[in-house]
Image (tube, rainbow, N blue to C red):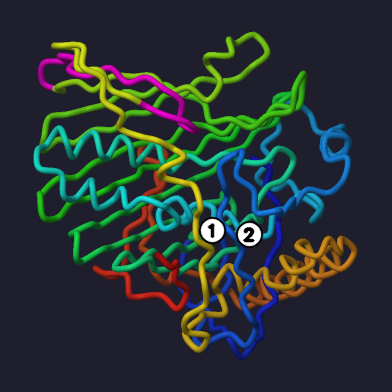
Amino acid sequence: MLTDLSLPMVKEEDVKVKGNGNENGGIIQIITTSTRKPVLTASLKLEGESDGQDYAAPNILQRVLSLLSNVRPGTDLTRFQLPPHFNIPKTMLQCYGEPVYCVSKDMLSQCANGKTPIERFMAVVAWNISTLRPLMFGVAPYNPILGETHHVSRGTLNVLLEQVSHHPPVSALHATDEKDGIDMIWCHHLHPKFNGTSVETAINGKRQLKLLNKGENYESGHPNLVIRFLPVPSVNWSGNIRIHCQETDLEAELCFGDNSFLSRKANHRSVRGKIFIMSSRETIYAINGHWDRVVTVKDVSNGELTVIYDAWEALSALKTPILKDPEGVWASESSVVWAEVSQNILSKCWDKAREAKTAVEEKERELLRDRKTKGETWVPKHFTVSHSKETGWSCFPNQKLVPPAPIVVPY
């Protein structure tokens, strides 16, 4: 995915720097609440469902091609800067968090409360598919700044994200629900590359979903995001992932179909795969469907079909988060950090949006230079992070439970 380098405007009295951190150099640890009002936006919706909001600037395809005209194929785009014409008014942290807390149907509870191991496993597969949302061509979220956070609650589910590295971009998520015994940890490392007529973003890292009351731990990967410019502009999830649970000896392999020029229409946003017993490799269910429509499983022993996921049922009429506790919002909150830029994008005041981003960048570069001069480094506030060439990035939450958030999603 195209990303941009923009850093937040934060008052000096709102921050302090911690030492002995990671090698990326630091940004901030927030110690006071923010005085800026958050700008909260609707969740990304299914195609065919509209809230009347179109974030893209006019002639977006021509603008994208012009922007990339001097970029060589194979270029890593993690440091590529985007003007606000190409941004939606939300950060990548919000785009990671929304699939967890913005749903019409409580699919996580189904995972936790399934009566049998296979019932819970199929619910986890369906929930993983539900985290894929259609994205708009030509626009991208802001690239989160180091130390940025996003904290939202929905009912008893509390979700907290933090940007734990800026170069390379790495985001951590921790979500807990004491009532249903759910503990979720994600660590995402983006790696976007320009391939001439497309941008393919590998979303590396591990997702863990623990069902504490069942003693089960589910691990999964994430498909790649492919943005094609020619011959027809499109955005799609593509690639293979595995979902497995050692405790139940169950595993699923899923293949997400691309919509390249040579692929068949049936592959457009398709998902196919199987559920099998890990120890014997015996396939027990076949998976087939489309992640933006309906997905079924077929019992290979008797041919019986069951719908495990209906995108319209799960993702239509999504609720926009609301601010419940203004005094509890951190200055590092995504919707605060990007408030001025987002408001101008929503108003289509592109010059003002550009000015706001420029002011943010210059202020934060000044703070970064100051920290380097003082020899100060930064460590994440909410996660402990490790990295190696063999295992990649790992993020571990510093607290057992995520506290209730000042931003909530109504039922």
- Quarter of image, res 72: top right
Q: Nearer the viewer, residue 275 or 12?
A: 275
Considering the numbered disc 1 on the image, is that residue within a helix, a strand or a loop? helix
Q: Nearer the viewer, residue 156 or 356?
A: 156
Q: Is residue 147 above or below residue 170?
A: below
Q: Nearer the viewer, residue 63 or 319?
A: 319
In the picture, the quarter occupied by the N terminus is top right
Q: How far across and down, in percent of the image, does residue 139 sit? A: 72, 45
Question: Any magenta on residue 271?
Answer: no
Q: Are marks 1 and 2 in contact (CB under 8 Å)?
A: yes
Q: Is residue 141 above or below residue 201?
A: below
The residue carrying pointer 1 sits among few (fewer than 14), some (14 to 19) or many (20 or more) residues within 10 Å by Cα, namely: many
Considering the numbered disc 2 on the image, is that residue within a helix, a strand or a loop? strand
- Quarter of image, res 192: top right
- Image-based side of 330 in relation to 136, left or right: left
The residue carrying pointer 2 sits among few (fewer than 14), some (14 to 19) or many (20 or more) residues within 10 Å by Cα, namely: many
Q: How far across and down, in percent of the image, does residue 407 sit? A: 47, 74
In the picture, the quarter occupied by the C terminus is bottom left
Residue at 79% across / 56% down in the picture? Answer: 84
Identify residue for label 1.
94
- Image-based side of 277 in relation to 143, left or right: left
Q: How far apart in space, not on screen, are marks 1 and 2 (Cα)? A: 6 Å
Q: How far across and down, in percent of the image, does residue 151 sit? A: 45, 69
The amino acid type, in three-letter code, at marker 2 is Lys
Residue stretch rendered in magenta on the structure = 279-295
Disc assigned to residue 90: 2
Question: Any magenta on residue 293?
Answer: yes
- Quarter of image, res 197: top right
Q: Is residue 137 above or below residue 34?
A: above
Residue at 11% across / 55% down in the picture? Answer: 213
Residue at 25% across / 57% down in the picture? Answer: 183
